[in-house]
Image (cartoon, rainbow, N blue to C red):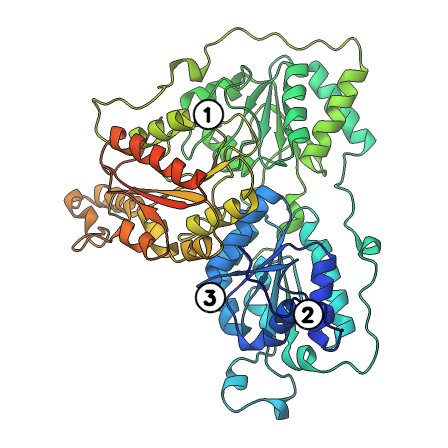
Amino acid sequence: MTEKSTPAGNTPVVWGSDVIAETIRALGYRFIALVPGSSFRGLHDSLVNHLGNHDPSMVVCLHEEHAVSIADGFSRVAQEPMAVALHANVGVMHASMTIFNAWCDRRPMLIIGATGPVDARKRRPWIDWIHTSKDQGALIRNFIKWDDQPTSPEAAIEAVLRADQITRTAPAGPVYVCLEVEMQETALDRTVKVPDIRRFNIPEAPAAPADTLKKVVNALREAKSPVLLFGRGSRESAAWQNRVALAEALGATVMTTLHNAACFPTEHPLHHLPPVGERPDAAESALLRQADLIVSFDWHDLAGFLSARFGEMQTQTPAPTHIVHCSVDGFAANGWSMDHQAFPAADIRVLADPDSLVRQLLAEIRAQKDWTPVTRKATGHWADTAPAGPDAGLPFNSEQLAFTLSAFSRGKDVTFARLPFGWPRIASRFTTPLDFLGKDGGGAVGTGTGHTVGAALALQGSSRLTIGVIGDGDYLMGVNALWTASHMKIPMMMVVANNRSYYNDEVHQERMARQRGRPVENKGIGQKLNDPAPDIVGLALCQGFEAGETVGSAEELQRALEKGAAAVAAGGRYIIDALIIPGYSDK
């Protein structure tokens, strides 16, 4: 729920920050997530008293990290950037981890920052000095697409227009515009106009050149056992349907990954292995070794994926299979971060948007009347033998939690904003582009709650039930993001897979102990979250959520999910603390 201002805006343009606020509105930003700060108090006033706190509406947060995570989660659904405002250098430093995470996720985001007076004689003692930096953008420049620090309203308008175009252009990524405080707070003595933003719109996504497209079509025509790797892709229904149509026209096997959001129906007959997880699987390796053509549509870490399945480092002994790799992600590489992953070998490189290539290939194939899909030897489908639900006779661990959630979501409009470590691949039954929104690309901790709040905000008013399933460590670091959901009355549910440990690091310590011949029994020292055990439910209640008792079985979880779904359907917010036995699934 948006807080209403009095008066409700539409005041004359008087201040430098007024035209900046108008530019943000003209570009179509619906929300701006923020923790208030004096460095952008001018812009804050313009958003409230000039624009009336709508378009964009303020999403008030308790920490700058959450503001960025909420914007990240919002863009995963809305496929448009949210604006974020950060207070001076301290706000940027607070938010830097989640900015890096959004960068690795290739999420669009317009970040507005601010600095104290550039002119030293205008700085207030102490506070303006510590909130002023000569090059504030340097704090995050290595993991954003672009930044600027304009010093006039005209330059600020241009900076915001450019930033918006850059953040929305593939490969997407956060951008940063730092507003000098004096520029925001100076009364205008001249007319400063926001131009027609249609003259500054983003370019169309790049498509494959004709010659390259012909090479890919010829490779597909000659292939007898093609495999399509669908990685990053649009949430648009048309793009989803095109991927399905292309796979069916080719008769090609499809693989997807739990690293990225759902981009193909996992129970489709051509997707006859479950989505790829963190570790290589023998069936995946066998399938890829039998393929005579692999087509990667912006597959995350193609070289690493193939190295693990073929058993050879791809830069030394590339996979013997003919490979087509379509991506524009190379434009994001800058050498500071290794998020670009290992360098994949490819026989045909396509510098194009992957959904554009799918659309082009589908048109070419449909135009060739003699095209016949390849026939593959019938094999069993993974979903035929996957559990339909939990087994009451087994201990309540990450697998049983996942099978309970999977069974609960069947036939319902459920969006899993996040899924935790230990989620079994065979519990991944996704039938629409909004069923699963992907992992956190930067491997961060504390982002799951914010991502879920942002996704639920984008889905507010729809029929979908937004559920974030995260570990207890992720939850405890990000729990205050839940307050924003309560404050804005955003319906959503959180399920905490609570093993009372930083369990992923227990696994690492066990590996170290075995490697060094030391006691494995010590792996939990410095890892356990007990004595006292954090009050998962109590922390959510403090943020305005509803909750029941901690659950310790699949049956109890099922009842809690039904109760939570009813609460969310009534416009509420619900938390479930699922106390599970530590361990990860190998399924």
- Disc 3 vs disc 1: Cβ atoms closer than 8 Å? no
Quadrant of residue 324 within the rendered picture: top right
- Judged left or right of residue 300, residue 247 is right
Which residue is nearer to you in this view: 192 or 162? 192
- Judged left or right of residue 528, residue 573 is right
Q: Residue at x 22, y 50 (%)?
A: 528
Q: Which mark, residue 94?
A: 3
User: Which comes before the other along the chain, label 1 or label 2?
Assistant: 2
Q: Which residue is mark 2?
A: 50
Q: Residue at x 83, y 80 (%)?
A: 190
Q: Report crowding for label 3: few under 14, some 14 to 19, many 20 or more residues within 10 A (C-alpha).
A: some
Amino acid type, residue under disc 3 in the picture:
His
Camera-near label (2 vs 3) is 2
- Judged left or right of residue 44, residue 397 is left
Q: Which residue is mark 1?
A: 429
Camera-near label (3 vs 1) is 1
Query: Tag 1, which secondary structure?
Result: loop
